[in-house]
């Protein structure tokens, strides 16, 4: 038997020696359920794949993919992408009723990419990248072109590694009109290592997910440090899906939620490829607010969005979570009502004015902190056919003029690029700041209108980015075992946390020409020009002459006969 | 004549000042008939604001004024209202003086022709008397200053008023005989908007007539003077363009100003023919029709110059009218400039055929423009076709007006050479036709 053992270990050694050193990759999945005070329920899925490899290495093509999806890996190396963030959202996040989301996203599709500094033609890479991504996600991202792409100078700093300050390598575009449906969910689910067959992804059934107030799926790819000293780097792929189920449409008015009610499925097993698979339920307001079953002894605490929250943790990699029935179904039953803590930063936007000639965009930003003022960076990208007049820009806080300390304005070029306005505004404590700017609506060529021109044209959401002062000290040290939802945004200092708020997109009507008239218009206008030409031609080429009337027919016939006869003619 | 002119100026300034201070000023400066993307005051302010922000005004597509305007308004933007009122006053006084000079010339030529018996006996009633010509310059100034179109244009602070002032000064210098100043001012007018280029021909013809150089392409004296004048004109244009380069240190203003005028990318409605035509144009033919429409403005110059080579001042009137009708972004300020000349041709009244129809059409259209705009943009009960129809009618009326005056002018000239009461071969009264 010594021989057998030795043979086994010898074989193991040989196998290990012969296997090429594969890059290590790791997959984690988690689901956070947060009951909201209005009776709705917020579920946030996060799937993270970490991979120790370098896509941007010269010469070495990565070919052996295991947990990391090959389609995305190839995209990263082909287009020298350093960071990629894409999100598809249906619905608008109601900050005042639901608080801050873990990962904010604007309605429609949003894509922002940091390219590597070695790229020489960023616009060309951007165009190809949007087309490739539109194929991967079955979305019409090919509508992203130079007329709706901007290069923000300060609002979208890299979330991963990289000391990039040159915003020439950044591209940001948003398609507010984009609709999200099952067609987009399916390829998104296919990118997961376990697909939708095992683990948390089995809960993602489209008939329940899209029957919600808010649905957002996103992919975030960035390079990160593996440890404190940043001795090794890895690529991180996060796929997030945020969904808010409405009390009345999905919950039938009963303040009682369960996994089965939300997703029409229960969990049966964790994804075998995942190194950790957990479900977190926010029980900070327990036990007065709601009752949770099955109970669990595991508790976790995390500081997220400036607040210390307590979570019940269910570890799906342990068999006892699933109980006797081999199925895990959470149940939350409401017991009472309470008030929500008001979010510290909130923004709204609307169009004022009447008629189809001019209008005004009003952006209102609320600072609900009782005594702290903090600066926010407001970024507005307005399409070229709404001509902004920057001299009409006014920023007022508490009915007094509030001059922004930094304004970066790039005016639009017709049919080439949109307006980009970025401002750093200091918000006084407990105040409302209003930013107004006037615009004029352009008349477009008849081929530039969408097939439904009277629906209106969408203006993408404004982005308000800020470092909000936090009530609780945020952890700046890096730990591997932090839950995923609290480690998305890197925390640089203890006293504040990063928040990005998206406003509503706007729907603006433009004056339309009559689409049935091209031929008629050409004819009529050319007629008027021809009338001018004709009158001038007559007056220029003809002279005045005395009008000798031509003789009547009888006289002419008589003259004809007389000529034949050789007799003198009649006059 | 100084006293009535001063009184007129005072009345005009009062009307404008009253309107500036009322709530109408804001309303008028938004009207698309009065301002266009080329000369709106809002855009001048926007350009100056962009310059303050450190961005070149020409980097966007909102500012289409020449650097000369930036230079000027950088210093006087707070006194803009006074600047525009002064510009209107300068235009009126320049037109007054030029028509006065022109009338003197006309009367002198008439006297010589009468003394040398060049007029047939029966057309003596067509001759002009000093008494009838006395008030014409004042009427011209009045037609310009008190024209509602001019008042609207001034209250809206449209830079069209400044362009009109430059053109009026050019006409004055031409009629006074100063080739140098005339060339410089024409270069400035061309630099502002390219179309006054066509006024080169009438100015040249006037100088040739004045210096008794016959217009004969085979004679060297003709070419000698033409080259001199062209040199002054082109030279000043080059100098002005070069100076504009040094303002912002780039040639960005050329595509922004001249490229914009020629390629008509902005389809904001105005009183011209271009906007709806190019809004409904098939993409394939766009370039072709742009070229056709732009050539349309310029190509009447040579034929008109040949026909009217003895009458350069009427040619100036015709050219300004053609520019105002067929330019890419016309406004009522351009229309007001050629309408100011109409009293100078008041002796043609008996030969005008359609003047009642034309005045009714123009009045009706001017009244309907704001109504149909409101119905389209604000009430939503009409659509763009209504406004377009009135545009067509207004331009048609203008074309009829100009061609009517041209007809009357040519007819009077014919009568002056052939006699007023023409008889047919059989002795009965004849009718004149164009054949």
Image: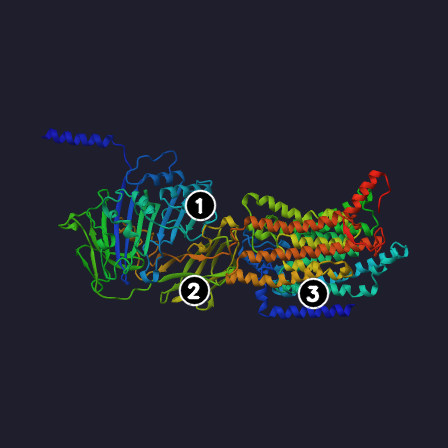
The disc placed on residue A433 is 2
Judging depth in this view, the residue of A523 and A329 nearest the camera is A523
**Is A174 situated left or right of B28 in this image?**
left
Toward the left, the furthest residue is A1
Circle 2: element type: strand
Circle 1: element type: helix
Judging depth in this view, the residue of A440 and A152 nearest the camera is A440
Q: For marks 1 and 2, give the CA distance.
A: 32 Å
Residue under the image location 81 percent in, 41 percent down: A561
Q: With respect to residue B218, does B24 lie above or below?
A: below
What residue would you read off at disc 3? B145
Asked which colour scheme the image uses, the reply is: rainbow
Give residue B428's quadrant in the image: bottom right
To which chain does the residue with label 1 belong? A
What residue would you read off at disc 1? A169
Q: Can you tell which of label 3 and label 1 is closer to the viewer?
A: 3
Residue under the image location 19 percent in, 59 percent down: A292
């Amino acid at each position: 038997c010594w021989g057998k053992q030795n043979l086994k270990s010898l074989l193991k050694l040989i196998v290990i020696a012969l296997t090429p050193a594969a890059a290590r990759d790791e997959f984690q999945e988690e689901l956070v359920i947060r009951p909201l005070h209005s009776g709705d329920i917020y579920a946030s899925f996060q799937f993270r794949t970490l991979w120790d490899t370098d896509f941007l290495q010269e010469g070495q093509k990565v070919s052996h993919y295991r947990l990391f999806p090959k389609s995305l890996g190839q995209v990263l190396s082909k287009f020298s992408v350093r960071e990629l963030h894409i999100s598809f959202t249906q619905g608008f996040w109601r900050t005042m009723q639901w608080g801050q989301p873990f990962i904010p996203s604007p309605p429609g599709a949003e894509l922002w990419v940091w390219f590597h500094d070695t790229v020489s033609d960023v616009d060309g890479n951007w165009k190809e990248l949007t087309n490739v991504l539109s194929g991967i996600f079955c979305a019409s991202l090919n509508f992203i072109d130079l007329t709706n792409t901007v290069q923000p100078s300060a609002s979208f700093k890299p979330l991963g590694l990289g000391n990039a300050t040159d915003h020439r390598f950044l591209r940001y575009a948003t398609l507010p009109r984009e609709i999200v449906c099952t067609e987009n969910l399916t390829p998104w689910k296919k990118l997961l290592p376990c697909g939708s067959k095992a683990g948390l992804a089995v809960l993602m059934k489209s008939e329940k997910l899209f029957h919600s107030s808010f649905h957002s799926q996103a992919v975030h790819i960035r390079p990160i440090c593996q440890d404190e000293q940043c001795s090794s780097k890895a690529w991180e792929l996060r796929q997030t899906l945020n969904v808010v189920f409405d009390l009345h449409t999905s919950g039938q008015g009963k303040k009682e939620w369960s996994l089965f009610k939300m997703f029409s499925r229960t969990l049966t097993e964790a994804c075998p490829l995942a190194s950790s698979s957990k479900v977190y339920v926010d029980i900070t307001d327990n036990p007065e607010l709601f009752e949770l079953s099955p109970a669990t002894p595991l508790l976790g605490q995390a500081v997220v969005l400036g607040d210390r929250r307590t979570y019940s943790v269910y570890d799906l990699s342990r068999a006892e979570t699933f109980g006797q029935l081999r199925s895990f179904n959470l149940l939350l039953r409401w017991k009472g009502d309470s008030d929500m803590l008001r979010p510290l930063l909130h923004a709204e936007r609307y169009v004022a004015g009447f008629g189809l000639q001019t209008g005004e965009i009003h952006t209102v930003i609320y600072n609900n902190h009782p005594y702290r003022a903090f600066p926010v960076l407001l970024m507005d990208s307005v399409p070229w056919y709404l001509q902004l007049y920057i001299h009409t820009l006014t920023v007022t806080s508490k009915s007094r003029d509030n001059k922004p300390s930094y304004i970066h304005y790039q005016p639009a070029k017709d049919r080439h690029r949109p307006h980009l306005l970025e401002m750093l505004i200091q918000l006084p404590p407990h105040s409302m700041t209003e930013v107004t700017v006037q615009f004029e609506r352009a008349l477009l060529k008849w081929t530039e209108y969408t097939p439904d021109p009277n629906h209106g044209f969408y203006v993408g959401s404004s982005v308000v980015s800020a470092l909000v002062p936090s009530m609780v000290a945020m952890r700046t040290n890096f730990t591997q075992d932090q839950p995923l939802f609290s480690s998305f945004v890197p925390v640089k200092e203890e006293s504040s946390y990063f928040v990005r708020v998206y406003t509503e997109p706007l729907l603006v009507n433009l004056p339309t020409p009559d689409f049935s008239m091209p031929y008629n218009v050409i004819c009529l206008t050319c007629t008027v020009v021809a009338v001018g030409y004709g009158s001038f031609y007559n007056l220029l080429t003809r002279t005045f002459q005395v009008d000798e009337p031509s003789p009547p027919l009888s006289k002419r016939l008589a003259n004809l006969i007389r000529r034949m006869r050789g007799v003198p003619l009649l006059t | 004549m100084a006293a009535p002119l001063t009184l007129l100026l005072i009345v005009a300034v009062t009307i404008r000042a009253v309107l500036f201070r009322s709530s109408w000023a804001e309303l008028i400066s938004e009207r698309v008939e009065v301002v266009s993307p080329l000369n709106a005051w809002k855009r001048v302010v926007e350009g100056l604001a962009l310059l303050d922000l450190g961005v070149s005004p020409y980097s966007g597509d909102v500012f289409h004024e020449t650097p000369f305007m930036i230079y000027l308004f950088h210093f006087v933007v707070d006194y803009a209202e006074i600047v525009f009122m002064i510009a209107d006053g300068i235009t009126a006084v320049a037109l007054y003086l030029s028509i006065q000079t022109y009338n003197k010339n006309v009367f002198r030529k008439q006297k010589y022709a009468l003394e040398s018996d060049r007029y047939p006996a029966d057309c003596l009633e067509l001759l002009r008397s000093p008494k009838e010509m006395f008030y014409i310059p004042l009427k011209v100034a009045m037609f310009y200053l008190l024209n509602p179109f001019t008042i609207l244009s001034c209250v809206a602070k449209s830079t069209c008023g400044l362009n009109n002032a430059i053109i009026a000064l050019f006409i004055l210098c031409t009629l006074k005989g100063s080739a140098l100043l005339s060339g410089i001012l024409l270069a400035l007018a061309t630099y502002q908007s390219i179309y006054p280029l066509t006024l080169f021909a009438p100015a040249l013809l006037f100088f040739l007539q004045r210096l008794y150089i016959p217009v004969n392409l085979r004679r060297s004296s003709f070419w000698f003077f033409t080259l001199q004048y062209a040199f002054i004109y082109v030279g000043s244009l080059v100098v002005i363009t070069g100076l504009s380069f040094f303002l912002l240190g780039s040639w960005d203003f050329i595509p922004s100003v001249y490229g914009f005028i020629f390629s008509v990318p902005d389809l904001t409605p105005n009183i011209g023919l271009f906007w709806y035509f190019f809004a409904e144009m098939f993409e394939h033919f766009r370039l072709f029709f742009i070229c056709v429409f732009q050539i349309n403005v310029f190509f009447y110059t040579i034929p008109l110059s040949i026909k009217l080579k003895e009458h350069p001042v009427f040619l100036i009137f015709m050219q300004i009218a053609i520019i105002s009708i067929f330019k890419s972004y016309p406004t009522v300020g351009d229309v007001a400039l050629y309408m100011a000349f109409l009293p100078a041709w008041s002796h043609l009244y008996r030969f005008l055929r359609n003047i009642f129809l034309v005045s009714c059409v123009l009045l009706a259209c001017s009244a309907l423009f704001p109504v149909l705009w409101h119905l389209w943009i604000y009430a939503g009960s009409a659509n763009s076709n209504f406004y377009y129809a009135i545009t067509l009618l207004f331009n048609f009326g203008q074309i009829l007006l100009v061609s009517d005056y041209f007809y009357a002018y040519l007819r009077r000239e014919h009568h002056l050479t052939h006699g007023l009461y023409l008889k047919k071969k059989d002795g009965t009264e004849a009718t004149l036709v164009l054949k």
